[in-house]
Amino acid sequence: MKKFADRVLSFGQSTIDSMTALCFEHKSLILAAGTPGFDTPEYLKQLAKKYIDRGHNQYTVNRGSRRLRRAIAEIWSEPVGRQLDPEAEITITCGATEALLAVAMAVVDPGDRVIVLEPFYENFKNIVLLSGGIPDFVPLVPPRWEPDLRALRERAHGAKMIIVNSPHNPTGTVLDEDILAEIARIAVENDLFVLSDETYRGMVFDIEEPSSLASFPGMAERTAVVSSFSKIMTATGWRVGFFIAAPEFTAQIRKVHDFASICAPAPFQDAVAEFLTSEEFPKFFRDLMDDYRKKRDTLTYALKIAGFDFAMPQGAYYVLADFSRIKPEFDDYQMAEFMARDVGVCAVGGRAFFATERGKHYLRFSFARKFDEINEAAEKISAMAGKL
């Protein structure tokens, strides 16, 4: 039989999927997946039903619902530092996942080197491989998980693109203005394209979020900002995301988007647009973030009692925790199995987010679950001392 394509043979099944299977095997609490463990708001569901009943069930134009693009332009023009043109600079996609791949396919040629900051959301490595590129991993340095700027300057020369993610999955770090400004300078000096994954923009705790990387000098024409409504509206199954890029850049990415999916689901685009511009959304989002803050504090308090080392998440809904003081003899897979089997809490092994062995003493926990689940998980984690 003929060999399958190298681009798909170069990586395996999602580690998060395999960890979720481990959760079910041991009937443990699932803090592994990034999917919210609670439903989409009722008002948003009713809007979707309304648009389905009104017949919004066929393809939209390639760039997506005009109403939604205009809403995005209103909200995102300030963070990206320019008045966005919803016709030429904003495109609706099947979630951020499709947008990420479309950007990579539009930019990366076989053999191109792409800088990926490590740890990373596992899709970043794979979109580079699917595009035929070569991922080049530059470390984020604990405890604050900021880029090693010296390494970044050295590796930027001759690279094609850099992928940046803030607020960050899996660490919860939010890169500050000075770090973003330095990344921007490096990108301009080395003529790099930039893929800025800002899926968790707005989902921050106790800090003022800096502007988008696209807003810094020289960045507008070289940066594609990718985001989504999956997380901020707890509707991950609706697959409504988008990218923002300058017109010339957008034109190339849209070619990939057109042949990959044509458009995101039409009734969901219109429902998201109406919810986003309604009086309901600001209150929903405030309540959502207040809820996440309580869950973060509950979970991190338990992790601290149990002896994990971690940086307090500033954004998103993840904690990347070092367990080496608790079980130094374990690697991340062994610790994940121990947690699922003996503690009753399932997390993701750190090497899902690292290309190197640096990840073998980390677990990632998600607090995007119902509050009673987080409370129960916290109780189990706090009681770990008796199991060690």
Image: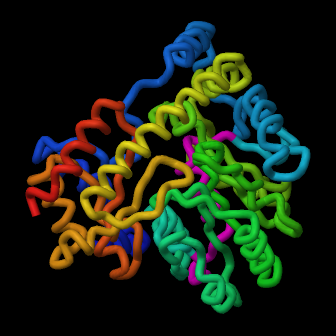
The residue drawn where x is 17% and y is 44% is 28
Q: Position of residue 331 (x, y in %)?
A: 21, 74
Residue 58 in view, yes or no: no
Q: Position of residue 296 (x, y in %)?
A: 43, 45
Say which quarter of the image contains residue 4: bottom left
Quadrant the N terminus occupies: bottom left
Q: Is residue 210 left or right of residue 300?
A: right
Query: Which residue is at the front of the view, 18 or 5?
Result: 18
The residue drawn where x is 22% and y is 50% is 382
Q: Position of residue 29 (x, y in %)?
A: 22, 42
Q: Is residue 127 left or right of residue 151?
A: left
The residue drawn where x is 36% and y is 36% is 369
Does 352 appear in magenta?
no
Q: Is residue 127 above or below residue 346?
A: below
Residue 208 in view, yes or no: yes
Q: Which residues are magenta?
A: 92-115
The residue drawn where x is 41% and y is 56% is 319
Q: Is residue 227 above or below residue 310?
A: above
Query: Which residue is at the front of the view, 12 or 44?
Result: 44
Q: Is residue 28 above or below residue 365?
A: above
Query: Which residue is at the front of the view, 101 or 290?
Result: 290
Q: Is residue 370 left or right of residue 25?
A: right
Q: How is the image coloured?
A: rainbow
Say which quarter of the image contains residue 84: top right
Quadrant the C terminus occupies: bottom left
- Can you name the residue that lies furthest to the front here? 305
Q: Position of residue 379 (x, y in %)?
A: 22, 42
Please give the count of numbered marks on the rendered protein. 0
